[in-house]
Image: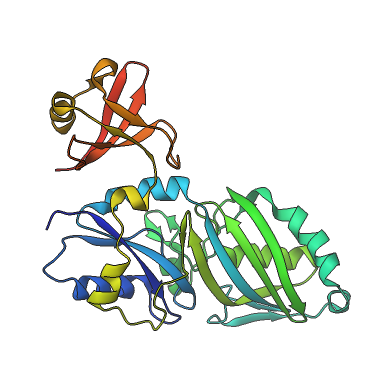
Amino acid sequence: MNNPKVFPIYKPPGPSSFKMVAQVKRVLKGQVSKVGHFGSLDPFAEGLMLIGVSGAAKLNQYIQQTFSKTYEAKGILGIKTSTGDKEGEVLIESENSKVFDLTLEKLKDLLETKFIGDYLQSPPSFSAAKHLGKPLYKWALEGKKIEKAPVLRKIYSLEILSFNYPYLSFRARVGSGTYIRSLFEDMAEVLGTVGHLDGLIRTEIGPHKIEGLPTHGEINPEEISLNELSLSQALPLNEIKLPVEGAKKFSHGNFVSEDTLGLVDSDKADYLPGHFWVFDPEGKLLGMGQKNPSGLKPVWVLS
């Protein structure tokens, strides 16, 4: 039961992220304990989700901290909605004749250089961002639109894929906490108009890609087990294999001195510098440690 794992799954358009977690919980009933996701998707959106079970939820903070996320989106210019996507109420319809004649190259010049890098973004009023401990979407459903101060976000890459007014498709790789709905509204504003998302798919979370996942939308035990990831596969880090005494110390939450560390493998992908997955002599994962010149400090010890 206490065997933390991570499952990459495909979420189809329609169900909420909560419903996808419930599906996984139902399919794996009796095999796992606590189940949770590592980043939600809006109901209208589709794509890759990572689901953690049996204690893997502790990975969430590290995944949010280290992994970028890649999306492909289709937006509609000239129409603003209450939610920033196609499910919202139409608030504004506005045409700007200058936008009609923009070429793909001109759009790339206007948008790609404008947004790549650090970017101040306000969360949508219909979102899980919180105000006074309550999600903004709950305030919005009560008729109270809360405008939060912009937060610094990161856009690693932005590629305009196609443009046939009013439709504009793009791919973006972004840092944690970035709302693609808000990004597109800001892109539309730069073009002198308004806009909303008509479609959104998350294709990557860090090293994990949507390719190869079943996309029929129904989760079954056989398929989900084929794609399960260990903690060290879900979050690639450098590794340390401790000798017996060092493993015993680490397992009890004690510091392990440099002279008793054993084999250090620094050739893995290093998403969290200075942090290592820690194994015993037989290759059993003991937890995560943080290394300094003196030795190894336990950060997370698996029970």
Q: Tell me the quadrant of the picture where the C terminus can be found.
A: top left
Residue 245 placement (x, y as % from top left): 14, 24
The answer to whether 11 appears left or right of 116 in the picture is left
**Residue 109: image location, x then y, percent:** 82, 59
Q: Is residue 12 left or right of residue 118?
A: left
Quadrant that contains the N terminus: bottom left
- Pinpoint residue 229: horizontal percent, then vertical percent: 31, 58
Would you say 237 lies left or right of 174 here?
left
On screen, residue 130 above or below 236:
below
Marks counted in the figure total 0
Query: Residue visible at 40% across and 66% down?
Result: 49
Residue 41 appears in the rendering: no
Give the left or right position of residue 281, taking residue 195 as reference.
Answer: left
| Picture layout, residue 294 above or below residue 30 | above
User: x%, y% of residue 108?
Assistant: 79, 63
- How was this image coloured? rainbow
The foreground one among 165 and 293 is 293
Residue found 30% across the figure and 78% down from its top: 219
Asked whether 33 or 129 is in front, the reply is 33
- Name which residue lies at 69% across and 52% down: 116
Rendering quarter of residue 51: bottom left
118 or 48, which is in the foreground?
48
In depth, the one of 218 and 23 nearer the eye is: 218
Residue at the spot 77% in from the left edge and 72% down from the top edge: 193
* Residue 48 visible in the shown view: yes
Q: Is residue 90 above or below residue 277?
A: below
Q: In the picture, residue 165 is in which quadrant?
A: bottom right
